[in-house]
Amino acid sequence: MNTRTLATVSLFTTLAASALFAGDWPQWQGPNRDGISAETALLKLWPTDGPKLVWTTRALGGGYSTPSVAGGRIYGMSYRGEDEVVWALDASSGKEVWVCRTGGKPSGVEKKIGYNDGSRSSPTVDGDALYVVGTGGDVSCVGTADGKLRWHKNLASDFGGRMMSGWGFSESPLVDGAKLICTPGGAQGTLLALDKKTGAKLWQTAEVTDAAAYASVVVAELFGKRQYIQFTGASVFGVDAANGKLLWRAPRPGKTAVIPTPIVFDNHVFVTSGYGIGCNLFKISMAGGKFTATEVYANTDMKNHHGGVVRVGNHLYGINDPRFLTCMDFKTGKVVWENESVGKGSVTFADGHLYVRSEGGKGGGGAVALVEATPTGYKETGRFQQPNRSNKNSWPHPVIANGRLYLRDQDVLLCYDVKDKKQR
């Protein structure tokens, strides 16, 4: 193979690793960080034993993190020995393309953290780069084509980061334009903006110094102002995307661990957490150039621990801890229906249906259900038991990308074909 051919192959590989496909899932909770897939023409009814299993990949290393899918590759994080790594797989075969040490070690190598069986963060893919947060607060930028580490920072040692409790840094970083947004927490500022190319600090929120929780930040435009909205164990707040200045803040005490991602819709922000706390809806208003947040409701009918809540139209769907799949009216907080379904677990939406995954370990769970996302009642249209079940809780959320369903379970990743062949 001559030099020109080698260069052409190298360029093609780089482009393939950076170009997004229409059905990709390039970050935590999908393209818009809302747990919603834009995919259509998916199976509405599963066979008795579930959709077709296309491939299974093993020996990924320990991890609770949900994978991301972009440009024909699958990206994830794991513990491998005393290293924390990010890896890339070929989406068509599940074969590993590269693996990269993230720049840090798992927190458990230096200190004990709860459920220290693997990484928590989902990689965020942005063009030819991806970004991850390790359990010890290591923020790393890695090239998608070759898996080479480009830069590395640590939320604790470089930015004074502090967690609300002891399960390690767990958020998935946000890319917005030229900025990478993370949540170190602590006295130097809860939110942090870095230059995504270099890792250089752009700003940190001096007006908000809550300890970091486990939720991932979202971006929204409210009354023409672009802002980052985050949820901690003390409050929910929005800051100016340009400079990190506080725009609004609502006290909202959590307990033990605050995890689910905030939901922003129609100038309202919905938050929920477990340990008996429940949910709250805040209306965001602006008058005289100033923002205010007013509580609309607070109840314990949606105590979501960490399986996530999705908004479909005017309704919310999520697991009310400890086990009931619940449909709730977004604006009023009224429960429309609830069903035990597969018990406690996680929820993702695609093509009119909820993909509901039980978190139960081997012998006590492993079920995955397909449920219509409708306020008219619980309508299950498929269910199967995940094979190759580990003895750990299956906390990674279901991922639907390019006609495939991906289920991560510690060092195993399963790929299912959920495309409706009649509509191909």
Image: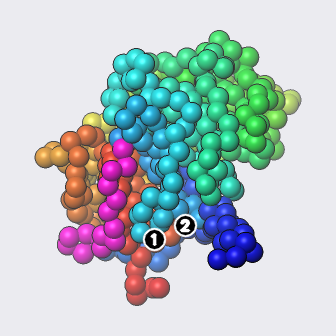
Spot occupied by residue 368 in the image (x, y as percentages of width and height): 28, 57
Read off the residue under disc 2: 72
Magenta span main SS: loop
- The answer to whether 176 appears left or right of 295 in the picture is right
Q: What element does badge 2 sit on? A: loop
Residue drawn at x 39%, y 39% is: 80
Read off the residue under disc 1: 92
State if disc 2 and disc 1 touch (CB < 8 Å): yes
Three-letter residue code for mark 2: Gly
Residue drawn at x 66%, y 19% is: 159
User: Is residue 70 found inside the magenta-colored segment of the image?
Assistant: no
Does any portion of residue 350 appear in the rendered image? no
Three-letter residue code for mark 1: Ser
Which quadrant of the structure image shows residue 78?
top left
Q: Nearer the viewer, residue 327 or 363?
A: 363
Q: Nearer the viewer, residue 52 or 100?
A: 100
**Boundaries of the magenta span:** 46-61
